[in-house]
Amino acid sequence: MDLGNGEQKIFIWIDFSKETEVVILHGVQVAMILNKEICLIGSPAVKNGTVEEAESRLRSLTLPISKILGTGRVHFLITLLPLQSILTEMAEEYDALLLVAHKKNSKELLKQLPHSGFPFLFVSAKDNLDLSYRKIAVPVGYMKKSKDLALWSSYFARHNGGKVTLLKTIEKFGEDNRMVMSNLFSIERLFKNFQFPYEVVECHTSTWKIQKTALEHALGFQQGVLIISFTYSSSFIDRLFKINDAFVIAHSEDLSVMCINSQRDLYTFCS
């Protein structure tokens, strides 16, 4: 299978566990929404098996997916290296746009996200996956990365008939508030180029605490996707007030949670 074919791909992290089917179903759903190819990625080290065994299992998993997406649009990749070592290759050689993984793998994979130029999507919902990407929550604070979060939300809204909820912070200091309004202005200007509904919800919280507030709001969707900026490293205070990424993912119930690296430029989505 030619991975380096110039077509963008949704990578799906396969650990050969009982949750594999759930992760694949989400990956296929996202690939169908965005009209992208799929690549299953796994390591023989996960189950202490051989390369041949891992390749055989991944190949068998591609067969039913190919019936849905079409021959030539489903690939697999066996890696003997840690994920951190191949993230750049995945993006630049194999055109990775997104990595989909189960939430139970988030502790392991979040450590690798600082090295990635594409987001990680953590999933767990087992039913009604067609509803999982139609309600999208995005926190908007003074960080420039807010615009990247909103850009990704627009992909789901445009291609899946979704609605975006922008959760805007209120800051104590004038310059911070000015940056929030500047980000919101840029996001709304982008959204108005497309025909999808969105709303702005004013949250009486600061950028520092917005991820927890966004989670609380998004849980009202029951199913949907929350897009957050990965905080790179969490402090004792972050953990104490339950505003770090690990807390958000652990308490996200059936929400899908997309984490975007706040320290790197993202590879561009090609429509």
Image (cartoon, helix red, strand yellow):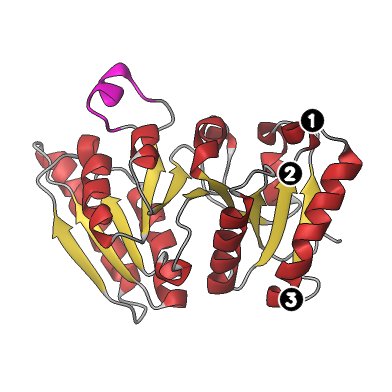
Q: In this view, does 214 lie to the left or right of 252?
A: left
Label 3 is placed on what type of residue? Answer: Lys
Residue depicted at 58% across the width and 48% down the height: 19
Q: What element carries label 3?
A: helix
Label 1 is placed on what type of residue? Answer: Asn
Given residues 188 and 14, the one toward you in this image is 14
In the displayed structure, would residue 232 be above or below residue 121?
Answer: above
Residue depicted at 54% across the width and 60% down the height: 26
Residue 241 forms part of the magenta stretch: yes
Residue that numbered label 2 is attached to: 42
Given residues 46 and 94, the one toward you in this image is 46
Residue that numbered label 1 is attached to: 48
Q: How far apart are marks 1 and 3 (CA)?
A: 30 Å
Percent from the top left, x then y, of residue 133? 42, 66
Q: Nearer the viewer, mark 2 or mark 1?
A: 1
Q: Distance between the residues labelled 2 and 3?
A: 21 Å
Snapshot quadrant of residue 5: bottom right
Q: Residues within 10 Å of mark 2 (few under 14, many from 20)?
A: many
Decide if residue 4 is in sight here. no
Residue that numbered label 3 is attached to: 67
Q: What element carries label 1?
A: loop
**2 or 1: tag closer to the N-terminus:** 2
Label 2 is placed on what type of residue? Answer: Gly
Percent from the top left, x then y, of residue 165? 25, 63
What range of the chain is rendered magenta? 234-243
Residue depicted at 62% across the width and 56% down the height: 21
* Labels in figure, total: 3
Tag 1 near tag 3, CB within 8 Å: no
Q: In this view, does 37 lie to the left or right of 123?
A: right
